[in-house]
Image: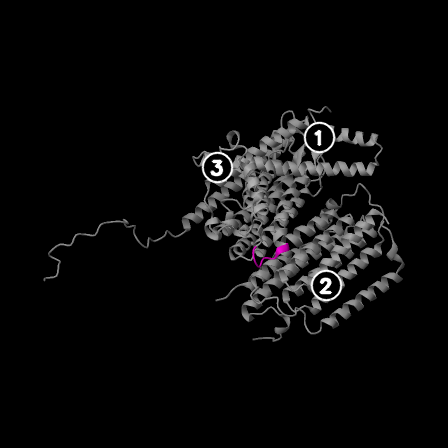
Amino acid sequence: MIPLSWYLILAAALFCLGLYGMLARKNAVAILMSVELMLNAVNINLVAFWRYGDPNQVVAQVFAIIVFAVSAAEVAVGLALVISLYRNRRTVIAENVDLLRW
Amino acid sequence: MGFFSDPISFLADWLTALMTNAGWPEGLINVIITFLGVFVVANFGMLFVIFLIWLERKLAARMQDRLGPNRVGPYGLMQTIADIVKLFTKEDTTPEGADKVVFNLAPIMAVLSVLLIWAVIPFAEGWIGTDLNVGVLYIVAVGSIGIVATLIAGWSSNNKFALLGAFRTVAQLVSYEVPMVLSLLIPVLLAGNMTNIPGLGVESGMGLGSIVRAQHNWYSIFFLMAPLAALIFFISSIAEVGRTPFDLLEAESEIVAGFHIEYSGAKFAMIFAAEFLHAFTISVLTMTIFFGGWQGPGDSIPLVGWAWFMVKSLIVYFLVAWVRTTLPRIRIDHMLNYNWKFLTPLALVLLISTALVDRIVVDAVDISMTQGQIVRTLSHLAANLLIAWATIAILRRRQAARPTRQPVASPRPVARPPEPETTADAPAA
Amino acid sequence: MTALQIIFLIVSALLLVSAFMVVTVPNLVRAALWLIAALFMTGVVFVLLDAGFLAVVQVVVYIGAIAILFIFAVMLTRRVMTDSGPQTNANWWLAGLFSLALFGGISWILLGWDGANASAPAIDPGLDTVTRLGTELVNPDAFILPFEVASVLLLAALIGAVVVAWERD
């Protein structure tokens, strides 16, 4: 049997990899990808706690489904912003976009 | 069970007994039997493609008043095998500047995405890879791997036509997934309301085995209850395969061959086989979900059930081939408009109306009885006809409200000899 | 070490390697493909946790929609994605340090927590999680409000994405 801590360590490692990507990457699309990794880490945690807590309660699965919906919405709007940015500024490098208005 | 009524179970039992007598551990025997099952299902699909390609070429030829393949073997049956030999002896090229790993991965993923669907298809009573309780969702999930395969095939080829094909893929396949999923929800809903009928064996609305068992009689097949959903599913799955009239992703006359332009030899053969197998798979799915699957007279014998499965699937496949050889390619904006302004709203309306009608009927009558089931079928049929009539009425009104086009030029005869000049008009010399 | 543990170790190694490639590979389409691998492996982890429904939904939503959107966005903006030069900003070492510190901190907390070695309780074989989930999601006493809020959020995102990406002449 796999102990709960294995899943939690896996999720923590995945979350930290995502965090590194989000902080270190220049490209806005790559930053969004890293955010997806972090959301997945959260989902692994939620499902692991569901399985190792009380499997008869489905609360954690409901949480995971809400996370799916939120990440789909986030990607749709985020990529629309990236494309709009590319169209206006000819760049998708996050640190080149530091003006509040132009 | 004798060999001739149920060969699969017979062979599996015989092998299990053989290995148990040899003293092998039980876990190993299970693994071997499962592996053999996977091997049989996958190879049935891949070998059947050889016949399907011949069949489709022959059908297309007859519909277009040609003879079709007739040189190799009787009726040209061996033509496909000759083609395979030719394709496998060709040079396996990888274009300059292509992303090699991804380029070679794409054909494998294309075949994989189709073969994985066969894991949940019920061939006959008890002949099913695995009856997942989320089978319908699984089909959608596996189909999305096929989209990724097409997309990366187009991107990694380093060819502008291939990339255009990949762009069209996203526009088309992702869009047509929406009405496909919505129309699949209708049989799921209908089967899901039959889970509490005793003795029927419907466990969950989403498993394909349960969907087949829910259509246990001629009056309870889902085509009668949801003809419009069947039609939407059929159309959108043809679009998912990317066949004419939706073959925009490999339109030969516009973008040469689309996403698979750079593929040659064995890799091209894999993409080609995946496309034909996918076309047969959507026929099988339409038949399984809307036409009662393997059920028919005498289906308690698995071999007869399997025969029904093949006959029904091939009839639907004939329709697919018929559509392919008859219709011209649709324009890209028409393709998107047709999806987003017609199929998707219609599927949404159908889903809501089916849910409402089924709720009312299931509360009012006892659908475990024959009369109740007939009442249910008739009310669904009536609701579908009403929606079809309303749709046609709306379309007629929009057609009438559309401004008639002003002709910008009248047609002229093309090759008319020049008018002979009369002497009166000639300048005076 | 049981067979299940070995499978878990292989799957998690694949997941972490894919995730590492996502954040380090310079070529963005390749990064998106590694992202697909990572998302698929997360689905396998869900299967190991007996959440088959969530695994299938994971493949449908993430690979079927989100990953394809990513690849598409990369292709649309690829003129500036020449993939030359560093893909990380000047503070990448700080980010790495911070992430490592966070991972170390979480692991340290987990090692000190005695609930972390709990083993999973047996699942009642009669429990149909999918049906349960469906009824809970639309049950007024349970989760109908978050469910509806999520649907409104999706609608807002749909409209918002169209408005933001609309090409004004």
Q: Which residue is mark 3?
A: B60
Image location of residue B257, percent across then percent down: 51, 50
Is the magenta region chiefly helix, strand or loop? loop
Q: Which residue is mark 1?
A: B8
Image location of residue B100, percent across then percent down: 62, 55
Q: Which residue is mark 2?
A: A18
Pointers 3 and 2 in contact (C-beta within 8 Å) = no
Residue C143 appears in the rendering:
no
Identify the amino acid type marked 3.
Ala
Quarter residue B97 falls in: bottom right
Identify the amino acid type marked 1.
Ile
In the structure shown, which secondary structural element does the residue marked by tag 1 occupy? helix
Pointers 2 and 1 in contact (C-beta within 8 Å) = no
In the displayed structure image, the side of residue A51 where residue B349 appears, left or right: left
What is the CA distance from the residue labelled 1 to the residue labelled 3? 34 Å
The boundaries of the magenta stretch are B95-101
The answer for which chain carries disc 1 is B
Q: Do dots 2 and 1 share one subunit?
A: no
The answer for which chain carries disc 3 is B
Image location of residue B251, percent across then percent down: 49, 49
In the displayed structure image, the side of residue B32 where residue B86 appears, left or right: left
The answer for which chain carries disc 2 is A
Mark drawn on residue C15: none
Label 2 vs label 1, nearer the camera: 1
In the structure shown, which secondary structural element does the residue marked by tag 2 occupy? helix
Quarter residue B53 falls in: top right
Residue at (60, 34) in percent of width and height: B291
Q: Do dots 1 and 3 share one subunit?
A: yes
Image location of residue B117, percent across then percent down: 65, 42
- Binning the other alpha carbons within 10 Å of mark 2 as few (below 14), some (14 to 19) or many (20 upward) gives many
Asked whether residue B98 is drawn in magenta, I would say yes
Quarter residue C97 falls in: bottom right
